[in-house]
Image (cartoon, helix red, strand yellow):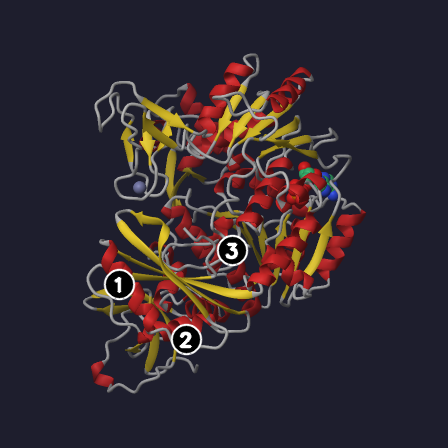
Amino acid sequence: MEKSPDIVAVMVSVSVDGPYSYRVPYGMEVQRGSIVAVPLVGRLTLGVVWGLPKDNYAHNRLKDIAQVFDTPPLSEELLRTVDWVSKYTLAAPGLVLRSVLRSTEALAPERPITAFRLTGVEPDKRTKSRDKVLDLLLDGQAWAKSAIIGEAGVSASVVEGLEKAGALARVEMAPPPIALPPDPDAAPPTLNEEQAAAMAQIREIDVNGFGVALLDGVTGGGKTEVFFEAVADTLRAGRQALVLLPEIALTSTFVERFSKRFGTKPAEWHSDMTPAQRARTWRSVLNGDVRVVLGARSALFLPFRELGLVVLDEEHDGAFKQYDGVNYHARDMAVVRARFAEARVILSSATPSVESRNNANQGRYKHVLLTSRFAEAGMPDIAPIDMREEPPEKGQWIAPKLAREVFATLDRGEQALLFLNRRGYAPLTLCKACGHQYQCPDCSAWLVEHRFRGVLMCHHCGHEQRVPKACTECGAVDSLTPIGPGIERVAEEAAERFPGARMVILSSDMGSNQQLKERFAEIERGEYDLVVGTQLVAKGHHFEKLTLVGVLDADLGLDRGDPRAAERTFQILTQVTGRAGRANRAGKAFLQTYHPDHPVMKAMVKGDREAFYKHELLAREAGGLPPFGRLAALIVSANEHDPAFAYAKQLLSVAPLAEGLKLFGPADAPISMIRGRHRVRLLAQSGKDFDLSGYVRFWLEQAPKTTGNLRVQVDIDPQSFL
Ligand code: ADP
Ligand code: ZN
């Protein structure tokens, strides 16, 4: 696009199908990628200059661009990514753009901060606190007010008092950068032979080119150390790097490791940051001051202009799929963006997704293996406990054999982990007197008792009610009884059976991120003997003294009508058993299961990952399931069931015929109501070379208009079938 034509197409960051035309007022300079504010139905909206307009509106019918922001334009690769994601997911391009342009605050010039320096004037009186401040400023520099307060340990009034007394002068200065440039050579590790070979393989992908490496290595094999070297290479090449993590809980450990390796912290991007921090980070990524970002999946849409590397740690993790507005999978979109940016991608995991494994098998991704743990640490021995043969006592959840192992571990002064991937006390509560089962008023789901907090809670919508004293149906007092175990109930049993053990419970609703971080640090220091936890403890942590892992319900998750159930179970079991025996101590893991012959359990027990992938890939191929076929889900929802179902039937009746395409449904969703909305599902399945997104778009164009509260949600490559 030539510089500043008269009329340009502007993509506005609202849910519309394409860019609108605007006039460029005299004297304004814009180009493709310029961030602008434009009038849209009576108010100013953020947008981006997309290019030349397609249509030729009469000049005088168009509105003027109101403002062009003083920032560099968005990169070409980011604009192309937005278009691509929109086309693929069927989300309006303006909606995808909204993942990029998040706030006007980020576009305003950086606000200066208040700082103080010495004037040389002697204050009227001296106090201990005043002396601390004056000593601190003896270096002659201007100090930010917050820095003075922090370093001198005084209150703001001391600083203000000294200013009044004329001893300090107020100055304005630029705020300190959000992150300092990391030094690629600060503290590089000495890679062992296998790690060095892995690194050499990754380096075969040009640091200035596109390519994907699947870093497929056992837990503790040094994947992080290896991809840090790729980050270093990217920095040396003058390009920016992005590391995506599936969970915020993993961030703090990661930031510490990064600081040790690179001499300074990376910039962070996740929901735990304040809007002001986010605004500054966004701007610093755009102007290139920030070189490395550590973030959640939404960081994928940050305005990098020199993106050279995207790392997805725990690439198999379901948290990389977003369901909110734009239904995208960060792993797949990272590969898309990297292709446009001519950047490298490293997908790192001990249990890669079946999709990525297939891409590696087919040679589309480089398959980089790390097969042994760093130092002497060995892989844990995994054994099943057949719940049909050796079940726990009635009313208990820990089988006798596992309990014996826990005692033995505690006797040796080592740590044990009891794992159950279910929050709360009990997944179902019923009244002994009348049989009433407590259900969410707005969802077709049981309420889960959270005993610590004394509430019944819906895990789908967050609805909460106090646990009633008397049954709300029949009025019987103290008649409510929990059915099945949640993590709190396991903890209760463990406290009774292992009374001497120092125990901690860890699940995502057990406190703030900060509190969880403290618990993790305490476990690492060996301040607990017994850890009882959900999937929160399964990932990313190194507990040196942990040598025993007991999985209380290894089958949990297997029996969902979900093509990825086996894969997910394999992944979570591998992750959690991998916690056992990290630092030159042998580890043991036990799986309590009713299905010891299931391929997942057999592969786990034999420690044979390859057997699992082989079996799973064959099963997927036979079923035409991803990665050998494509799936798209359409979820029709409405306030009433019948209109939703009727509309879904209508949709089915107008579906265009296409070769090799199969349609399933309509059927009530397994969770047939969420937040008071009834849900009906349709599923389309096609071969892998079929443009399923294009097909669904065409299909919806044939569909009758939705009226009232009817909604159709499209989910390409669905990860959940609930
Ligand atoms: P993974 O990411 O594969 O689970 P990590 O990179 O976290 O493995 O490595 C496991 C542990 O071994 C970490 O404490 C890490 O610092 C250490 N480690 C791995 N490789 C090296 C190395 N080459 N030099 C020093 N320490 C290493
Ligand atoms: Zn609910």
Query: Is there any visible trace of residue 134 in the rendered image?
Result: no
Seen as rendered, the residue at the extreme right is 193
Q: Nearer the viewer, mark 3 or mark 1?
A: 1
Mark 1, residue position: 646
In this rendering, the answer to whether 424 lies above or below 414 is: below
Mark 2, residue position: 31
Q: Which sits earlier in the primary sequence, circle 1 or circle 2?
A: 2
Q: Position of residue 126 (x, y in %)?
A: 39, 21
Residue, x 45% and y 59% (percent of image)?
328
Q: Position of residue 697 (x, y in %)?
A: 38, 72
- Which numbered dot is residue 710? none
Mark 1–mark 2 distance (CA, rounded to whole Å): 48 Å
Q: Position of residue 583 (x, y in %)?
A: 71, 31
Q: Specify whether 208 is left or right of 658.
A: right
Q: Specify whether 90 is left or right of 385.
A: left
Residues packed near mark 2 inside 10 Å, few (<14), some (14 to 19) or many (20 plus):
some
Residues packed near mark 3 inside 10 Å, few (<14), some (14 to 19) or many (20 plus):
some
Closest to the observer: 198 or 78? 198
Q: Position of residue 141 (x, y in %)?
A: 49, 40
Q: Which sits earlier in the primary sequence, circle 3 or circle 1?
A: 3
SS at circle 3: loop
Q: Which sits earlier in the primary sequence, circle 2 or circle 3?
A: 2
SS at circle 2: loop
Quarter occupied by the N terminus:
bottom left
